[in-house]
Amino acid sequence: MDSRYNSFQNWLNTILSVDLPEKVEAINFNLYEDVGNVWSIELVGAGSFDEEDEDWACDEVFTTRDDPFTIRYKGSWEEVEEIFTGYIRQYLENGKLAERLKWYKAVAVGFVDGNITVLYKSDEIGVLRTSQQLQSQHTRPKKFYKLSFDAKLYERIIRKKENVITVYETNIDEIECEGFRKTRFHTCPLVDVDFIEWPEVIFYFDSNKADYGLDYLYNVDDWPVIHKRVMNRLVEIGVSGIKYYPIKLIDKETGTINDDYVFMHIRNFIEAYDMEKSKYTYYEKFDLYTFLPHEIVLDREECSKYDIFRCNKFESIIYISQRVRDEIVSNDWTGFAMNEV
């Protein structure tokens, strides 16, 4: 294999090192052509497998669409398919986490607009092992993830010269309300406060430079602003500790108001860190803690009580549970970056 295989297996190791949603029954690797002799591959977790009907690969409950693996190659699609098929076969044979890939009923590959080829199919023993492995997820330590806007996705969108809604101008610094003086309202996401009267918050964008919006809206103040479909689903599955406040998204070109987004105010400020194991500095004069991000250790017993939270000693980071992460992934919501801690 060429040196690109090493990069491919590192990409796949990262994906398989985290539990995929329990609904995944089979794996398909989608291939597609980008511009400039660039070819991409993504992993799709399907909720079903039917050897007689290739449409099983469209039953997506998990994808890495926001983080594909790419190569630059000047050649035909058939040659590219052969290259990626070779990579997958090699990984199935001796990849670091090949056994995890074989937990599933099948592993296939193919271009999104073509036929797929099944490279691996488990026997009855394999299916049993898959069930046992998936059930064992319930006894593993719970996982948590840092939640933020997906800057890497945004960069890829810009490189492709696509136009996505971007908010560089707001009225936030002009807002003055109880508890916040003028120019300080941008800090409200970091404060555990219940707004009795929510002020009018306006985000501006230019429709001449925006064709669509992500589910997690990029904005200059770095507020967690999400699409209402995300809000509705989080409410539906019982994610608590969040208050949702309306945002006016105004097109500067036409004056049209888009009311599809809300500010997600996280109210779970908890004792999230194991202070004996974490490394930090405490400034008594200011009652202020500073942490090195890579030296933070979560108190997982305490954190396991919440699906979404901030630490009350270091409020800038949003954490989510495995359950919320799986919901984001299975719904293919865009703009969310989730890094395991």
Image (cartoon, rainbow, N blue to C red):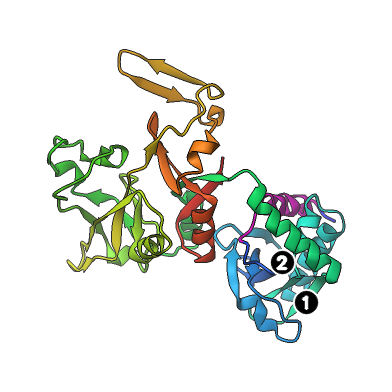
Q: Nearer the viewer, residue 49 or 1?
A: 49
Inspect the magenta stretch and tell me whether residue 10 lies in it: yes
Name the residue located 79 percent from the left edge and 65 percent from the top edge. Answer: 128
Residue 180 visible to the viewer: yes
Disc 1 target residue: 117
* Marks 1/2: CA–CA distance: 23 Å
Of helix, strand and loop, which one carries label 1? strand
Identify the image quadrant of the N terminus: bottom right
Of helix, strand and loop, which one carries label 2? loop
Q: Residues within 10 Å of mark 1 (few under 14, many from 20)?
A: some
Label for residue 93? none
The answer to whether residue 328 is left or right of residue 7 is: left
Residue 278, x across and y down, in percent: 53, 25
Above or below residue 90? Residue 54 is below
Q: Residues within 10 Å of mark 2 (few under 14, many from 20)?
A: few
Of the two numbered discs 1 and 2 in the rendering, the one whose residue sits closer to the viewer: 1
Residue 249 sits in which quadrant? bottom left
Disc 2 target residue: 74
Identity, as a three-letter code, of the amino acid under mark 1? Thr
Name the residue located 14 percent from the left edge and 43 percent from the top edge. Answer: 174
Name the residue located 74 percent from the left edge and 57 percent from the top edge. Answer: 133
In the rendered structure, which segment of residues is drawn in magenta? Answer: 3-21
Residue 102 visible to the viewer: no
Inspect the magenta stretch and tell me whether residue 85 lies in it: no
